[in-house]
Amino acid sequence: MELKIGNISAIELANTYGTPIYVYNQQIIIERIKQLKDAFPNTKLCYAVKANSNIEILKVIAEQGLGADCSNRVEISLAQKAGFNLKKSLYTGVNPTNEDLKAALESGITMNIDDITIFKRLLTFGTPEKISFRINPGFGKGKFPGITVGGHGTKFGMNESLATEAYRQAKDLGIKEFGIHMMTGSCVLYNDYFTELTLAIQDIAKRIESSVGIRFSFIDIGGGLGVPYEPHEKPINLKQIGENVLREYNHNAQLALEPGRFIVAESGTLLTKVTTLKNKYIGVDAGMSTLLRPALYNAYHPILLANNTEADFTQEANVVGPICENTDFFAKNRAMPTVKESDILAIQIVGAYGFCMCSSYNGILKPAEVLVDGNQHRLIREKECLH
């Protein structure tokens, strides 16, 4: 049986647009947003633009009423063009440039500042009406060390003492509306972690309010909601996470959440053609410049034979690309069916941190992107071409 994405054959899509190609299922994106809204009612939801910044994907998400979580002025611009309400959105820059700070300030987006020194730099361009600061609580969690963004040895946020001083300075400047933010990791599949995170930031928020004499209008627990990539991993129980978090949350400030991966990861499939069969190596036309995560994190992505999803596994093989690096792999010693040249492999769960981490290394052209909605499909980014 051929793999289908939405109601469309993956082989048809590969033949129509060429390979390698990123394909996204719009209905999965919309369903994940609905699940989030159901699990976290009355919560400020901001989509992490960095997870997938294709403008057409952003438009789909903006139409569902979410805000945007932006990392720099480019993402703020993309969010504006896609139709996000910047008044419901958040800018969190790490080591931002002056241009980033000025653009964020001028856009009216809520600014979430990573350090007191950055706040002082911001003030040379103007004073925002509302301010938030990012807390590093001294702990973090993530599937890989590289995506754990809280705790000791990470470059993100400031400790409670420094943040307290930052809020005191902001209050003295006449700023009257405040938020507080914590983002500690990515792709967390441990349900209770989000309750622990909520309790931690809630306690910090109450101590700062008492010390400085302010009230927070929102408390942001960041993102980090994981999706299962590996066969042994189980999906998070989003409904239970929401119930547990909201049961423990007893602050008057609006709760905020910044999902990225959870919304888009499972919507994406990378279709790639088998070019070479060599010993135990299956060579394909996508490379680590097309999908970096396996080379960067040793990340696991499921791989199917799109021509026949029911084919039996008959071999243990390595799936590799055309890059002149020995890190250029998608799978090592993976159980695979028998394949032949020109077959199409489907590398799955690539909707987050897939195309957005592409490069043109080794002269590999960036692939096209296609959006599927039921029986319809359309090109949302053309393949990079030689000029």
Image: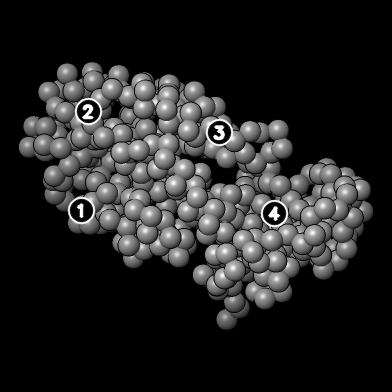
Circles 4 and 2 in contact, beta carbons < 8 Å:
no
The numbered mark at residue 347 is 4
Q: Name the residue under label 2.
A: 252
Q: Which residue is drawn at 70% across and 33% down?
A: 232
The numbered mark, 4 or 1, whose residue comes first in the sequence reads 1
The numbered mark, 4 or 3, whose residue comes first in the sequence reads 3
**Direction from residue 231 to residue 365 in the image, left or right:** left
Most foreground residue, 26 or 177:
26
**Callout 2, which amino acid?**
Asn
Q: Mark 4 Cα within 10 Å, few/some/many (few <14, many 20+)?
A: many
The numbered mark at residue 376 is none
Q: Where is residue 128 in the image (x, y as percent from the top left)?
A: 15, 46
Tell me the CA gap for discs 4 and 1: 39 Å
**Callout 3, which amino acid?**
Ile
Tell me the CA gap for discs 1 and 2: 24 Å
**Callout 1, which amino acid?**
Gly
**Direction from residue 95 to residue 176 in the image, left or right:** left
Q: Mark 1 points at which residue?
A: 108
User: Can residue 307 be seen here?
Assistant: yes
- Indicate the colouring scheme: one colour
Quarter the N terminus occupies: bottom right
Q: Mark 1 Cα within 10 Å, few/some/many (few <14, many 20+)?
A: some
Q: What element carries label 2?
A: loop
The numbered mark, 4 or 2, whose residue comes first in the sequence reads 2
Q: Is mark 4 on a helix, strand or loop?
A: strand
Q: Residue at x 77, y 62 (%)?
A: 2
Q: Name the residue under label 3.
A: 236
The numbered mark, 1 or 3, whose residue comes first in the sequence reads 1
Q: Which residue is drawn at 36% across and 27% down?
A: 246
| Residue 244 position by quadrant | top left
Circles 1 and 3 in contact, beta carbons < 8 Å:
no
